Amino acid sequence: MNHYDVIIIGAGAGGGTVAYSLAPTGKKILILERGGYLPKEDDNWNPDAIFQGRKYQVQEKWLDRDNESFKPQAFYNVGGNTKVYGAALQRMREADFGEVKHQGGVSPAWELNYQNLEPYYTRAESIFKIHGNKGEDITEPSMSAEYPFPAMPHEPRLQEVSDNLEELGLHPHHLTLAVDRNVEDPENSPCIRCATCDPYPCKIDAKMDAQKACVDPALEYDNVELKINAKVNKLITDESGKKITSVKVEINGEIEEYTADTFILSAGSINSAALLLKSKSEQHPNGLANSSSMVGRNLMLHNHSAIVAIADKPNHTAFQKTLGFNDFYFANSESEYPLGQIQMTGKSKWNRLDIFSPGSIPKPTLEYMAEHAVDWWLTSEDLPDPNNRVTITEEGQIKVDFTPNNVKTHQDFVSMWQGYLRQIGFFMFMVTQVPLSAVWHQVGTCKFGSDPKTNVLDLNCRTHDVENLYVVDGSFFPSMGAVNPTLTIIANALRVSDRLKDKIG
Ligand SMILES: Cc1cc2nc3c(=O)[nH]c(=O)nc-3n(C[C@H](O)[C@H](O)[C@H](O)COP(=O)(O)OP(=O)(O)OC[C@H]3O[C@@H](n4cnc5c(N)ncnc54)[C@H](O)[C@@H]3O)c2cc1C
Ligand code: SF4
């Protein structure tokens, strides 16, 4: 049996970052990833393949709270979900780390504050080549450095929309993006600003996803090894139950076993919880590291809505995800409670609009709508609820027992934004509240905190119950704010890696 210093389960944002950070230590590191490399092919940028074919999405089915099965919009491959992400990487706001009152309840405080993460946000922005203009976003937290690259500029129609909304008293900002294009030197930059970025994979490897930013550089070190199509089925402890000794891994239908001194679980919040629950044993009868009964609980997904806003003017923007507004992120002139953040999404094509109401609108109408549409993405915070939980059935199937909360505030937000858009010439709206299957922003399920009775992880993301097991994906979040979660996952994984370096030497 091969023995490693460190085994990392999952090559996505969290796991990839730890591999990147630990690679220079010379320690023998094995990354186990259940998916393969996402193929580079024309279909990467083919909307039919992405929206109608759901190519690259996992084929498995999960159960909802009513035991109805659904196909999760999740992606198993090197780089994890970041292979198809919108690459809008944002810091949580300073106030998100404290208690925040919402219409639907209270978003609890973290035991860490923003300043504890700030240096790691700065490092994360450098590794992921973030583009942005410091000082534009009115909710921007204090930053110790400039963004590594200037912001991606708006194309003409988006600039016009931004100016029109600014005239109404709002504060537009450029989104902070992880794409490899230096706007001061575009000829020598890989990214071509295409129209198929969010939610497509990048055919020319110009998106700073976790594979490109972290896993590939980590694999340049001889001490780092990656096994693909390697699905971890179980973590095994010693007799005391306090140490993991090995993992059972399914590779090409065969079960293999690998041992290590330290184990880093980073399979994504839902799969990490499922794997801990599946790894129950005599010493851990309720699931591994689950003496608190908190494994799987407090799943958060964000409340998201897409608004396709139609105006008379055509919108010929190719790369649309450049504009955002945070005027309503905290209590504001429109609401005594926080509403959330507004950002652009990828430019709609008729194929994308068709999935909102399949077959019910003729293709020529959808094509007209797509040509005249400006596409918005509104995100509001949802709140941790122990009843929103991941469990597994006797057969090992994942069940996501989830009831959305803080929904009224989100609906008010969506109506309010349409009111603003009407004032600048948009007259028709296609609004879709994103369903459970879109588990894109999954966090929670193994929350961190100093009390082992109520938390799965300690503040260094080590499980309270098992001394050599860490969880570094989105599972640790005690609450999530309304910004996109991945920069915080990466920054936290860098923080945990520093603790690990102290420990493993
Ligand atoms: C369409 C889309 C758009 C998005 N846009 C944005 C955005 O603009 N900004 C943002 O911040 N976030 C965005 N996200 C979310 C972002 O992708 C996730 O927050 C991030 O990838 C989560 O990181 P993670 O480490 O928790 O999990 P992941 O990155 O999903 O990594 C988990 C990895 O573990 C592997 N795995 C799972 N189970 C096992 C097992 N049993 N054995 C071995 N390996 C396993 C998986 O295959 C996967 O590679 C988007 C997501 C999607 C799907
Ligand atoms: S916009 Fe740039 S990073 Fe995004 S898919 Fe196109 S080339 Fe790749």
Image (spheres, rainbow, N blue to C red):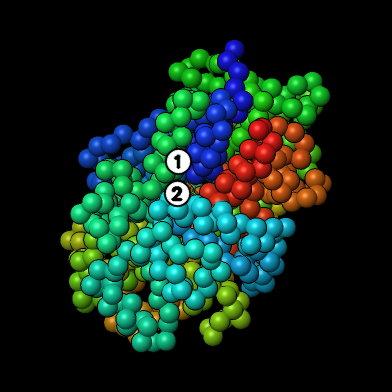
SS category of the residue bearing label 2: helix
Q: Which mark is residue 127?
A: 2
Residue 409 found in image quarter: bottom right
Residue furthest to the top in view is: 1
Q: Position of residue 87 (x, y in %)?
A: 40, 54
- What residue sits 64% from the left and 62% below the top? 115
Per the image, the residue denoted by label 1 is 214
SS category of the residue bearing label 1: helix
- What residue sits 51% from the left and 57% below the top? 122
Q: Position of residue 94 (x, y in %)?
A: 61, 67
Residue 484 placement, left or right of 96:
left
Answer few, some or many: residues within 10 Å of disc 1's Cα (few below 14, many 20 plus, some between 14 and 19).
many
Q: Amino acid at mark 2?
A: Ile
Residue 376 visible (yes or no): no
Residue 305 placement, left or right of 187:
right
In this rendering, the answer to whether 155 lies above or below 202 is below
Residue 458 visible (yes or no): yes
Q: Position of residue 108 (x, y in %)?
A: 70, 62
In this rendering, the answer to whether 192 lies above or below 278 is below
Residue 441 placement, left or right of 496:
left
Q: Do the residues under discs 1 and 2 have CB atoms within 8 angstroms?
A: yes
Instruction: Measure the C-alpha gap from mark 1 to mark 2.
Output: 8 Å
